[in-house]
Image (cartoon, rainbow, N blue to C red):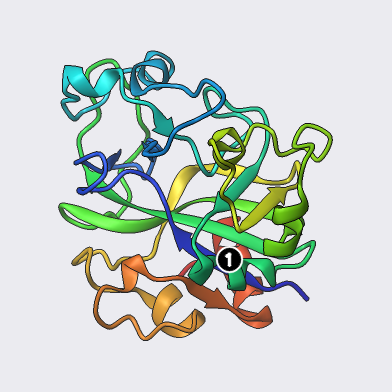
Amino acid sequence: MARSIAINVAANTNLPGFRGPIYPDGSFVYIPIPEREPTAKPVPTYGDLLADLGPLPVSVDDDLLDRRVHLDPEFADYPCCSHYTYGDEHGVKAGPLAELQPGDSLYFYATLTSHEPPDGVDTGPAVDWIAPDWGAYLIGEFRVDRVYDTAACESLTDFESQGVATNAHCKREPFDAKVLVVGTDDSRLFDRAVPLSSAESGSTANRLVTECSNDSGKGPWWRRRLWFDEDATERLRAIVDGERSL
């Protein structure tokens, strides 16, 4: 049976200074963090992404439009992407991620700010689980195809043949990933977010965190890695697929 991990990604109030939006119907916009390291290959800018993502309900400073993005995780159907890959240079994440096996799930969650959609953006009926102001939400999933642990990353020389050349860490100079995860074609960026926060407060964890994961939901749980065992992963997948409710 499969296991899963959920990790925090995407824009936040520190980098680049705002969170991505979530709309009343649960749809959202994934916005990556800035790239802070030198790169050997060209990487997209916020301006490049916003040209494809369309209008946002948050103001983006003009000086940010030319800033490069660290587009990680990458989802095949997201602008400027063609594969499902995720890399990390931090050992504290690399160890647990390296334990993922083919068929396991790597979930990505982000803190998102509640917004009304901008003019011209059509959304569906409102849901009742959006947290006021901000909350933490699952935004995507990799069904794991393969994982390169630290030793495997250190021996990687031909990124193209291994199908990881498009990952943001493989574009850095020097390459710095301590783990690389490649998703199957069953991976996806969700159309609708899945809440980890309660409907009452973004800082209050809901039952997916407190009953299903290894986390107590106390303190800044939305910054931590969440482990789900086999039974919890089965429940989580059913919730994500709309086959059962929270």
> Which image quadrant for residue 27?
top left
* Residue 56 falls in image quadrant: top left
- 173 or 115: which is nearer to us? 173
| Quarter of the rendering occupied by the C terminus | bottom left
Which class describes the residues within 10 Å of circle 1: few (<14), some (14-19), or many (20+)?
many
Residue under the image location 16 percent in, 26 percent down: 59
Above or below, comparing residue 16 to residue 104 in the picture: above
Quadrant of the drawing holding the N terminus: bottom right
Above or below — where is 138 with respect to 169?
Answer: below
Residue 154 left/right relative to 131: right
Closer to the camera in the image, 130 or 12: 12
- The image shows residue 158 at horizontal and vertical percentages of 79, 37
Which residue is labeled 1 in the image? 94
Identified at 36% across, 19% down, the residue is 50
Of 226 and 233, which appears nearest the observer? Answer: 226
Q: Position of residue 159 (x, y in %)?
A: 75, 37
Residue lying at 20% horizontally and 34% vertically, measured from the top left: 116
Would residue 229 be visible to someone looking at this image? yes
At which x and y percent is residue 67?
31, 24
Question: Amino acid type of disc 1?
Answer: Ala
Q: Nearer the viewer, residue 224 or 118?
A: 224
